[in-house]
Image: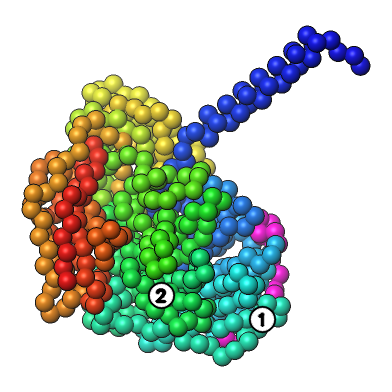
């Protein structure tokens, strides 16, 4: 067919224009960053027996063909995601999903799965189509009785199995034959606990107990030719639940303690704990860690999951960034080099704000919905439609997101069922009289117990009211109703006095104090073993002192204090050291 020049020009111009606008539309769609807020908003399963409570722990996440899969103990299934934001549950009868601490490894185009030894022994499974929920037995009788396994495939194609969960025994490793998946050697001891020198390994809510603690939850990561063996301690029910780190030149060791320990820790803020984690990479090469976080109110195994970025700096310095680890966080669509690149700038607006409610259950007062403590919650007297909670931000703020954390007071639910979901509305007002709809969840059918809502555009708000339409069981209960945005003012000034004293009898302990100034919401203590490696974070609200007990007694430490309010964070300008 012949085409004249004008026609040819029109076709070329039209094609280029259409391509440009398709590209522009795609760019515009992708320009809005993906944002999450810990704890991850999964449909956590209720336990199958005992007191009714949700739980998930001991997570394993991995990248398979550019998409993500997540296993967790006692979850009745596993999750799939394409973006680390939205997770869909996959159920199967082929795996022992009631065994603790599942692990998985990708070998070629197949995933191999293993959990702690259960009533059927120690079995390894495999699948090349995990979305289908179909799995086959790969090794029916691994001759090791183990707890908290980790399958690790080295870059040379050799397969290793790390395991251990004890307050006496070490973390161990054995090599497996790549075809038969049977051991090639006797187990090798990697390391044992050292509670005398390592404060993060000590038992208790804040590493403050003399009882024998546990080391468990091994996870191996190879990076730039070095082997980073992570392990959890001291107990999953504590705010102090953390991960330590050893480094080696070979999968069998010998292992040396990393300079910057613990590898991940989160003892302050709304929800605490960052232990028994797995480390994986996204499609841009960023490292992420998914960790166990503690509630432990209804039962000590009442737990959730949190997602944190990790960084490997040089050979000996690696850390998990948990600073402001329960504030909104960006999931980047690029390679990042520092925690600054995931910050949204959204600040907490709801802390200790006046709350009124339709009713309250004795022992669960209204103020608990704004106290930044997931272990305390407000409960209405009933679960009937119409129960409500109203919050006064005390001045007009620009809000960008909020998180509703449901507490399931009085629930009798066990396991999963189709009727487990929450329905509610959130309205807003600037004067407390005229109300507009902010979010309408009246038709919701998804189970989202930590519902994080990102508003399509920022809204000027002073009053917020959340009204119950449906709870799956029990009372309408919230811990907390967390609101994020900016108050459109200035960040606070840093404290004029900041004092540090290392305990003379126990060098794993340090005492800090500062002058608390008005207009400050809270403080973030940053510390580490060098002035340029302040990798540890400890967030506190409404205090002027803090005792930290998770130090290595044989190392010097450096500290600074950041302060924050509803407008932003003021980073510390002074760094103090203790030897």
Identify the residue position indicated by label 1 in the image. 177
State the colouring used for the structure image: rainbow
**361 left or right, relative to 3:** left
Tag 2, which secondary structure? strand
Q: Residue at x 12, y 63 (%)?
A: 500
Give the quarter of the figure containing the N terminus: top right
The x and y percentages for residue 172 are 48, 83
In the image, 553: left or right of 329?
Answer: left
Answer with mark 1 or mark 2, whichever residue precedes in sequence: 1
Dot 1 crowding, Cα within 10 Å, few <14, some 14–19, many 20+: some
Report the span colored magenta: 128-144
Provide residue 412's location: percent of width, then percent of height.
Answer: 42, 59
Residue 32 versus residue 571 in the image, above or below = above
- Tell me what residue is drawn at x 69 percent, y 65 percent: 108
* Residue behind mark 2: 246
Q: Which mark is residue 187?
A: none
Rendered location of residue 156, percent (x, y): 63, 72
């Amino acid at each position: 067919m012949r085409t004249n020049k004008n026609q040819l020009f029109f076709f070329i111009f039209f094609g280029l224009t259409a391509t440009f606008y398709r590209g522009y539309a795609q760019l515009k769609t992708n320009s809005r960053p993906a944002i999450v807020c810990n704890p991850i908003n999964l449909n956590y399963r209720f336990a199958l027996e005992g007191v009714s409570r949700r739980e998930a722990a001991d997570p394993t996440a991995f990248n398979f063909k550019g998409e993500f899969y997540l296993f967790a103990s006692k979850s009745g299934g596993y999750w799939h995601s394409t973006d680390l934001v939205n997770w869909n549950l996959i159920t199967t009868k082929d795996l022992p999903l009631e065994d603790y601490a599942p692990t998985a490894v990708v070998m070629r185009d197949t995933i191999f799965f293993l959990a702690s030894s259960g009533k059927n022994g120690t079995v390894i499974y495999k699948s090349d189509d995990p979305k289908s929920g179909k799995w086959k037995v790969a090794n029916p009788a691994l001759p090791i009785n183990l707890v908290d396994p980790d399958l690790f495939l080295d870059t040379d194609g050799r397969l290793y199995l790390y395991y251990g969960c004890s307050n006496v025994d070490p973390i161990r490793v054995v090599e497996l034959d790549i075809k038969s998946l049977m051991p090639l050697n006797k187990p090798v001891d990697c390391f044992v606990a050292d509670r005398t020198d390592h404060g993060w390994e000590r038992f208790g809510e804040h590493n403050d107990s003399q009882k024998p603690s546990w080391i468990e939850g091994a996870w191996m990561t190879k990076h730039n030719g070095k082997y980073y063996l992570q392990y959890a301690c001291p107990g999953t029910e504590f705010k102090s639940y953390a991960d330590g780190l050893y480094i080696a030149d070979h999968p069998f060791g010998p292992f040396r303690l990393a300079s910057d320990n613990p590898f991940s820790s989160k003892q302050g803020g709304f929800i605490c704990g960052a232990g028994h984690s797995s480390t994986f990479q996204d499609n841009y090469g960023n490292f992420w860690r998914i960790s166990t976080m503690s509630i432990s109110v209804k039962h000590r195994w009442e737990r959730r999951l949190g997602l944190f970025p990790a960084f490997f700096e040089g050979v000996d310095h690696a850390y998990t960034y948990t600073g402001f680890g329960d504030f909104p966080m960006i999931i980047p669509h690029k390679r990042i080099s520092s925690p600054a690149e995931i910050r949204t700038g959204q600040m907490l607006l709801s802390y200790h704000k006046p709350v009124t409610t339709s009713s309250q259950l004795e022992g669960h007062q209204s103020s608990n919905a704004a106290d930044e403590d997931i272990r305390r919650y407000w409960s209405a007297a009933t679960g009937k439609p119409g129960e409500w909670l109203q919050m006064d931000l005390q001045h007009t703020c620009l809000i960008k997101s909020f998180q509703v954390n449901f507490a399931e007071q009085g629930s009798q639910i066990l396991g999963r069922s189709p009727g487990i979901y929450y329905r509610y509305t959130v309205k807003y007002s600037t004067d407390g009289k005229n109300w507009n709809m902010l979010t309408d969840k009246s038709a919701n059918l998804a189970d989202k117990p930590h519902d994080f809502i990102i508003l399509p555009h920022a809204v000027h708000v002073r009053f917020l009211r959340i009204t119950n339409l449906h709870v799956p069981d029990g009372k309408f209960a919230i811990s907390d109703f967390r609101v994020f945005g900016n108050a459109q003012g200035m960040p606070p000034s840093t404290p004029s006095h900041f004092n540090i004293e290392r305990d003379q009898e126990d060098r794993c302990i340090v005492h800090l104090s500062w002058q608390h100034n008005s207009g400050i919401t809270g403080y973030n203590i940053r510390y580490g073993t060098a002035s340029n490696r302040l990798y540890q974070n400890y967030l506190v609200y409404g205090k002027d002192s803090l005792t930290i007990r998770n130090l290595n007694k044989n190392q010097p430490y450096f500290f600074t204090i950041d302060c924050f309010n509803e407008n932003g964070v003021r980073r510390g300008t002074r760094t103090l050291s203790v030897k």
